């Protein structure tokens, strides 16, 4: 399993020419990377029905998302509301791989703005369950 995100910035490190232009081959690579990012993270993500609205008091420390049909995924993206600071100190994501059979797909010690976990293998699931296992005292998770 590989994790990326980690509240960091991506530096592409292409520099403009002395005239202030970006070389055409670099522009093409930027576009290729941008197209991949949009397709991977901003376009055709898996959508499901949540048990409780995200962020609601009813959701508590566990959030369940159910899908109408089995979905094959290769990564899980989670985010934390940091309005009151970074609160999550432990979390896990489980996938329902068959009826009432839950498999841990990812876990960690903090989330921050965004945590992306690339799974070792594609997995087909019917639901996802995220659970905050440890949160900072006095901070809403």
Image (tube, rainbow, N blue to C red):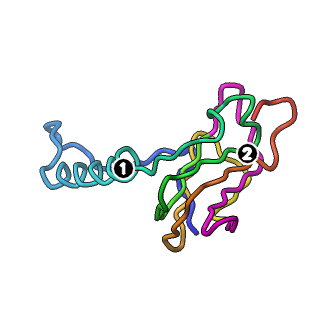
- Residue occupying the point 63% across, 38% down: 80
Question: Could you tell me residue 54's position as x and y percent?
Answer: 62, 34
CB under 8 Å between callouts 1 and 2?
A: no
> Which region shows up in magenta?
80-103
83 left or right, relative to 42: right
* Residue nearer the viewer, 47 or 108: 47
Residue drawn at x 51%, y 74% is 121
Q: Is residue 2 above or below residue 27?
A: below
**Residue 17's image quarter?**
top left
With respect to residue 113, does 31 lie above or below? below
Who is closer to the viewer here, 123 or 13? 123
Residue lying farthest to the top in this orientation: 83
Find numbered disc 1 in the image and state the secondary structure of the residue it sits on: loop
Q: Name the quadrant of the N terminus.
A: bottom right
Residue located 66% across and 36% down the image: 52
Labels 1 and 2: the sequence-earlier one: 1
Q: Which residue is mark 1?
A: 44
Query: Residue 104's spot in the image, x, y percent?
Result: 68, 65
What residue does disc 2 label? Answer: 62
Residue 119: give x, y in percent of width and height. 54, 67
Q: Quadrant of the C terminus?
A: top right
- Residue at the extreme bottom: 121
57 vs 50: above or below: above
Dot 1, how many residues are within 10 Å of its Cα: few (below 14), some (14-19), or many (20+)? few
The residue that appears at 68% across and 44% down in the rendered structure is 63
């Amino acid at each position: 399993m590989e994790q990326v995100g980690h509240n960091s910035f991506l530096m592409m490190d292409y520099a403009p020419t002395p005239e202030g232009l970006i070389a055409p081959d670099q522009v093409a690579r930027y576009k290729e990377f941008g197209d991949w990012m949009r397709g991977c993270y901003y376009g055709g993500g898996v959508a499901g029905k949540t048990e409780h609205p995200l962020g609601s008091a009813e959701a508590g420390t566990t959030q369940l998302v159910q899908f109408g049909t089995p979905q094959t995924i290769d990564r899980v993206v989670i985010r934390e509301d940091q309005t009151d600071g970074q609160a999550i100190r432990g979390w896990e994501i489980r996938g329902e791989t068959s009826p009432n059979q839950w498999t841990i797909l990812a876990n960690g010690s903090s989330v921050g703005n965004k945590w992306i976990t690339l799974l070792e293998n594609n997995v087909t699931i019917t639901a996802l369950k995220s659970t905050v296992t440890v949160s900072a005292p006095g901070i809403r998770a």
